[in-house]
Amino acid sequence: MLEIHNLSISFQRNRASFDRETLSVVSDISLSVQPGEIVALIGASGAGKSLVAHALLGLLPANATMSGEFIFKGKRLSPAGIQELRGREIALIPQSVTHLNPLTRVGKQVYRSARLSGRCADTAHTSCDRTFARYQLADTVKSMYPFQISRGMARRVLTATATAGNANLIIADEPTTGLDPEVSEQSLAHLKELATQGKGVVLITHDLENGVQIADTLVVLYEGMTVEITPARALEENDLIMHPYTRSLWQALPRNGFMSLPPTPSSSTLNRNGCLFAERCPQARPGCRQSAPSLRRVNHKLVRCNHVAG
């Protein structure tokens, strides 16, 4: 359904000396999503997860420069093609419930989303009704404003807004942030249901537990680069985790004893010539700081590490 090849994103910014510098934030990211598959982008804040989604949706700011290729349903997407698909074939469940318009009733927002996807008025009303029922939203909620509903209900409304139309690819950006465990479980179950219906789902999350729980494939990002692409089930078997960063994320989970890593180096001291994880890696050798590893296939997985034999 979706293929991303060699995506890189940089930003131009002004310096104190009145000249401009280029800041590279995403480098050489590739991934694919099949119908009925959930792909989780995993990484800490600042790893570039949301930027990948914004690039795919054509939402990068004016000072951003992007290179790479998007292929959707076998067709290469141009910037104009991305704009055409946004909200129709590709829908976003945003991270914050503040994306709901505070001045518009909830029902009208979901209805507008269905209309934007190309549905006629009657079909849009029917889709809106079905979507509210699917996510256990009472008819009375349609006449409410966002400030009148709970945070968990607002998250369900955001999901309804993204799925009331004909979108085949759903991007969920940190869908469980700030939610209590019960509502978080419901949000993840809704994403799983979408995949069961044959839709492709991209889950953006810093919570590895969420990815392991519902995803088919994990794409692990570190400092804007892909370090490992692995089946989610492989993490349950620690011996199958290949990249040291992925292993450290797994070991930091409560079930694995909260084993922590050294602090992240500041961007000013980060060595861009070698492995970006070398300063924190327990397996690092001098050569890791001199030569940047490439993403290569090892045992049906993709990993960016010089220590992994393959």
Image (cartoon, grey):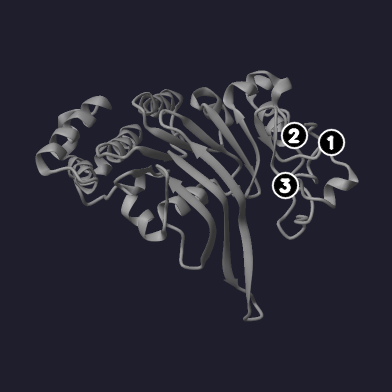
Location of residue 138 (image quadrant): top left
Query: Mark 3 or mark 2: which is in front?
Result: 2
Circle 1 SS class:
loop
In-front residue for pair 113/105: 113
Amino acid type shown at disc 1: Gln
Q: Quadrant of residue 90?
A: top left
Expressed as whole percent of the image width and height from the top left, the position of residue 164 reads: 25, 37
Amino acid identity at mark 3: Thr
Q: Secondary structure at mark 2?
A: helix
Closer mark to the observer between disc 3 and disc 1: 1
Q: Residue at x 22, y 43 (%)?
A: 145
Q: What whole-number distance in Å separates the C-alpha atoms at marks 1 and 2?
A: 8 Å
Please name the residue that numbered disc 1 is placed on.
Answer: 283
Contact between labelled residues 2 and 1, with CB atoms less than 8 Å apart? yes
Which SS class for mark 3?
Answer: loop
Q: Give the labeled residue for mark 2.
A: 244
Residue 42, given in percent of the width and then of the height, sits at 58, 37
- Mark earlier in primary sequence (1, 2): 2
Residue at the extreme left of the image, as rendered:
122
Instruction: Give the residue furthest to the front.
Output: 74
**The label number, if any, that marks residue 264 in the structure image:** 3
What percent of the width, then of the height, locates residue 103?
22, 52
Q: CA distance from mark 3 to mark 1?
A: 16 Å
